[in-house]
Amino acid sequence: MPARARSPLDPPLSFRVIRTIFLTLLSGFVLLPVYVMVTSSLKPLKDVAGQFRWIPSGLTIRPYIDIWHTVPLAKYFVNSLIVAGTATVCSVVIAIFAAYAVSRYRFRGKRLFTVTVLSTQMFPGILFLLPLFLIFVNIGNSTGVALYGSRGGLILTYLTFSLPFSIWMLIGYFDSVPRDLDEAATVDGCGPLGALFRVVIPAAVPGIVAVAVYAFMTAWGEVLFASVMTNDATRTLAVGLQGYSTQNDVYWNQIMAASLVVSIPVVAGFLLLQKYLVAGLTAGAVK
Amino acid sequence: MTSAPTTLPPDAKAGGRAGRAPAGGPRPGRVRRPGRLRRTALPYLLLLPALLLELLIHLVPMVMGIVMSFRQLTQFFIRDWSRAPWTGFDNYRLAVDVNRPVGEALLGSFLTTCLFTLLSVGLCWLLGTAAAVFMQETFRGRGFLRALFLVPYALPVYAAVITWAFMFQRDNGMVNHLLHDQLGLGGAEHTFWLLGDNSFWALLTVSVWKGWPFAFLIVMAALQNVPRDLYEAAALDGAGIWQQIRRITLPSVGAVNQVLILVLFLWTFNDFNTPFVLFGKSAPEAADLISIHIYQSSFVTWNFGTGSAMSVLLLLFLLLVTAGYLFFTTRGRKDADAR
């Protein structure tokens, strides 16, 4: 490398050495399960059942074909997609309205509202799992609206999981959009909602994307409520993946293949949108 | 916030909004009436969906959970839980009586969770902060590393944890192969990772692996707000990189750390997904986190009343810790909640 003049901001050698060592070790730690997931998903069953090997003895794509038959993975996939997708859309819309109200209006009970919503963040899920289960069952018995075991019940539940954080982050984001902009819009003839849709939302797109990503990931990865609140028809991936272990065999290669397949949409989406997430966090959460 | 804001027209700006209907003219007091009514109702209408859902999914169940904790709620009363006999504080007595098996197990699980949370939050924070600080300067491959480090955060819990469960298998797992067969550590006998005392360390490893990128993300976001000039000025004054990190970088994430550590604490303490996927419905004693423990007391042994009492105790503990934490961390900061 050609020598260039060192600026006073260039870190010294000791810093760079320590940085390289630290980041290498950390990358190794992060990558280890990813490596195991990918390689094991390409191994024949006798290979994953025996002693672990770093390099597969023979590659096969068989697990990727078998995963769809061993359990109805496609059905679980569709269920997860419907549940997580709907929960995300609803959660983001509801959070936008709530955050707009908090950010742009003064009203009685505002502080109570923000404190209440935020404190639901700390409730242990286990505390309201059983009551919610009973409420859903009772609503079903008395009105015939099937919430327990249905996708609707799960959607309702999941969208409240991401709601507090989404509202909180969007309040911060909306606050950072200058008020002059939406006031100008109202002077130009927009109603308050017109100002929200024409000015505030477009200016807060990174924050909204960040919140949507968060909501989707929360719903896609939830296990506890999914395992209690679903039945055979509405099972999501979180529960469905357990179907690859039978009494006699654990199909580890298929489990790894299925894990990879269900991870790809979220990881790809997340990595594509991560710059929005960082920008959203910068403006919203970190103030 | 000033006192009694809603009895007055919100503020001068709101007047501008109202004045849009007629073109100019002196402020038409009476005509504005319906508009103002709509304006005062509007924020509540906007909040309504969020409020209703929070009520239905969080607050009503929470109140129900508290009521249920005073009843002897077994599987016989599930159909109509209001008929379950009222037992006063019996469930609580059972939960806190450390001389009897239920209370003793709960205390054990609580202490395990405390130690686990302390270690996990500490390590997550340390790794996340170190990585964010090291990656503040641009260098080749930084963008790639940043994306890579977010992968554990993005992976769905069950997919990531199930992979770790595979790696921790005794006979065909990667961990034992690496430690015993390749590095010769711990003798020739393979270790049980998902049973017995070692399960604590297995769980901790997975929890840190999954949790540290969140700390990284938040600290990294916070560091983007630190002005470059500060570093340049410090460097010109002769401060080395380590001094800059100590005097500029770390203090500037101080406020963020308060929120970050609280959130990490609450998430880790309540975490159900990780132990559930790693161990199933009943975790080994050494890794019996409180949420799994309560789940088991409720859904496996069918004693919902006791399970509810345990949940309420857990909530009280979390409230206490959070309130204390917020009190001590925000005491010095003026107008921390001026919004």
Image: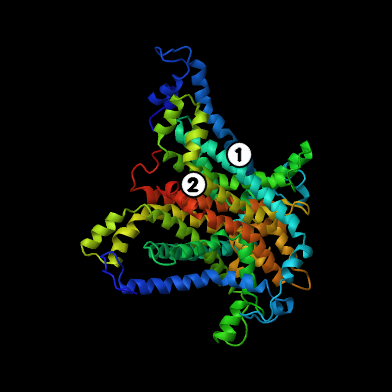
Disc 1 vs disc 2: which is toward the camera? Answer: 2
Closer to the camera in the image, B109 or A131: A131
- Say which quarter of the image contains residue B230: bottom left
Q: Which residue is mark 1?
A: B55
Q: Is residue B78 visible?
A: yes
Kindly give the residue lying farthest to the front in the view shown.
Answer: A2
Query: Label 1 lies in what chain?
Result: B
Residue A109 % position (x, y)? 49, 32
Residue B206 % position (x, y)? 56, 67
Relative side of B325 to A224, left or right: left
Q: Type of residue at label 2?
A: Pro
Closer to the camera in the image, A72 or A110: A72
Q: Type of residue at label 1?
A: Leu
Relative side of B133 to B91, left or right: left
Residue A56 % position (x, y)? 65, 79
On screen, residue A66 above or below B7: below
Q: Is residue A101 visible?
A: no
Query: Label 2 lies in what chain?
Result: A
Q: How far is the residue under mark 1 from the one under mark 2?
A: 29 Å
Q: Secondary structure at mark 1?
A: helix
Quadrant where the N terminus of chain A sits is bottom left
Kindly give the residue lying farthest to the left in the view shown.
Answer: B237
On screen, residue B320 above or below B175: above
Q: Which mark is residue A248?
A: none
Residue at 47% x, 51% y: name it: B322
Kindly indicate whether the residue at mark 2 contacts the one at mark 1 (C-beta within 8 angstroms): no
Q: Secondary structure at mark 2?
A: helix
Residue B106 % position (x, y)? 60, 61
Q: Which residue is mark 2?
A: A206
Please tell me how many numbered marks the rendered image carries: 2
The local crowd at label 1, few if under 14, some if 14 to 19, many if 20 or more residues have their Cα within 10 Å, is: some
